Image (tube, rainbow, N blue to C red):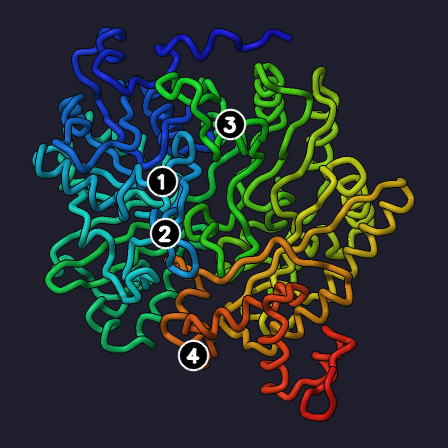
Amino acid sequence: MERHTNTRKDPSLWLPTSVKEIEALGWEQPDVILFSGDAYVDHPSFGAAVIGRTLQAQGLKVAIVPQPNWRDDLRDFKKLGRPRLFFGVSAGAMDSMVNHYTAARRRRSDDAYTPGGKHGMRPDYPTIVYSEILKKLYPDVPVIAGGIEASLRRVSHYDYWQDRLLPSILLDAPVDMIIYGMGEIPVTKLAERLANGEHISQITDLPQSALLLPADKMPDADDENIILSSFEECKRDKKRQSANFKHVEQQSNRMHGAVIWQRHGDKAVKINPMLPPMTTAQIDASFDLPYTRLPHPRYKDKTIPAWEMIKHSINLHRGCFGGCAFCTISAHQGKFIASRSKSSILREARQVVAMDDFKGYISDLGGPSANMYRMGGKDLSICEKCLRQSCLHPKPCRNLNNDHAPLLDIYHAVDALPGVKKSFIGSGVRYDLSMFQSGDERIDRTNRRYNEELIEYHVSGRLKVAPEHTCDRVLDIMRKPSFSQFYDFKKIFDRVNRISGLRQQLIPYFISSHPGCREVDMAELAAETKDLDMHLEQVQDFTPTPMTVATEIYYTGYHPYTGERVYCAIKPEEKLAQRRYFFWYDRTYRADIEKALNRLHRPDLLRRLYPAYRDPRNKKR
């Protein structure tokens, strides 16, 4: 197998990042310049690379300025001059505030998307900061925002770090347009229209775009136009913000959505509908672009943690129909699955095998959810009318095809490649999907085999799954299945390990302080997982992020779909009181947990967690 030994040494194989690189290519002027909060890694998992390579394939000259310095004389924003068509700005692969701060609002000490993991290489809200600088320097050049941060802040939204309702980011960032969601197709259409002489102000109908217009441009509500409550109304009445979110989520998950409008003072935010899911040919075209799959040579020998994590992994599809209440995937990628062809996946697998440091192990054959490859509705005419947020909750849709045969075929084909010793599944597996009885014996038999092969051949010692909680009432708000399904899957896991002579671990993810979760629910989670002989590791405190059901409940106190009030742990002491139950076995927390369970009048849970416990009011321990 030919190794890619000289790729790092030839900067012409990357999109240029400096004047010197542009001159070496013989360009007079770039057509598009992209500013990104992330380091430039030329890999299909990094947004700036994907958009840059997509525009390059269109015949455009594209340059990237990764992590520009916004504190000095702004030379990074000036060095490449003005582009012929537009500037693109993105905060990066994560919302900058999630990237910068913990659930306790403490500043993180590292940044996985920066060389050496160094923090402080991007500002808070880079979409706003970068676009303000560019508009001051080049007021007549269009500035287009994209990426997670702009995408999920396209309407009024609660910001956990400022603890207040914010307007659409279009009111704070002086951009001409947001392209939200997966951007390859809309950014291509935008570039074509600008290149053909249209002014950016004329382009108001681009699919998957959001823009600011005068309020008098708002139409009356009809089947094709949804008028949300205004930002000012939402600030006065949280119920209106909650009701808004229901419309936004439903339209984001429709195959053919309506236009959404929201007034902000004398302006109106117009959000054009999402495109239908990419075809296999379209998504193949994106993944088959000439990525080097490596960090730019400018970083020399510095490590970029996010790339190290995924460099030997392969993404099989986009989209997720799970609809989890705390997750933003469907708001950004949609719930309909866009799957790559087998040939495209195998081409990328061969590229991974050819990497200098590849040792024979594919770290992940996955996606937003590992096992949704080539799944969707049996009758698409039903899907075209559907407003469900999840195809799996409250129970799997009967129109859903959950056949895992195509996925098994991919696993077998990748494992058969010369140089591949083993492929692992590192993405989250939806066991409720693989265990769902479709009623078709062939499919159900295949899915049983999928679970068995997954456990026997594709686990790197530990299989991570995400039940998220043990309380069915909380799980219902999360849009997750009953914890009883975890027990069912664990039986399969234990049986396969026993038969195969393996000693693998099943590692569950759990969340504390999710809307609807009370302290006693966490105490019961602790007792239930203790009975399973688990010392929990993969845990997190709920962090409200823009455009999720859970965040809307956290901020407003109401469920957007029922209008009912929902309890939320808001105060830091309430959140800590829930989180410490994850660590019931740590003596640091034991006294506080004992005191809390006495206050909650749950001696039964005390005895389950600490069998030797004796109430000091009766006798000493």
Q: Nearer the viewer, mark 2 or mark 4?
A: 2
Residue at 30% x, 29% y is: 66
> Badge 1 is on which residue?
119
Q: 10 Å neighbourhood of mark 4: few (<14), some, or many (≥20)?
A: few
Q: Earlier in the sequence, mark 3 or mark 4?
A: 3
Q: Which of the labelled discs sits on residue 563, or is there none?
A: 4
Q: Nearer the viewer, mark 3 or mark 2?
A: 2
Q: Quadrant of residue 143?
A: top left
**Residues tagged 2 and 1 counted as in contact (Cβ below 8 A):** yes
Q: Which of the labelled discs sits on residue 602, or is there none?
A: none
Q: CA distance from mark 1 to mark 3?
A: 34 Å
> Badge 3 is on which residue?
284
Q: Which of the labelled discs sits on residue 107, or is there none?
A: 2
Q: 10 Å neighbourhood of mark 3: few (<14), some, or many (≥20)?
A: many
Q: Nearer the viewer, mark 4 or mark 1?
A: 1
Residue 485's x, y, as percent? Answer: 73, 62
Mark 1 belongs to which amino acid?
Answer: His
Q: Nearer the viewer, mark 3 or mark 4?
A: 4
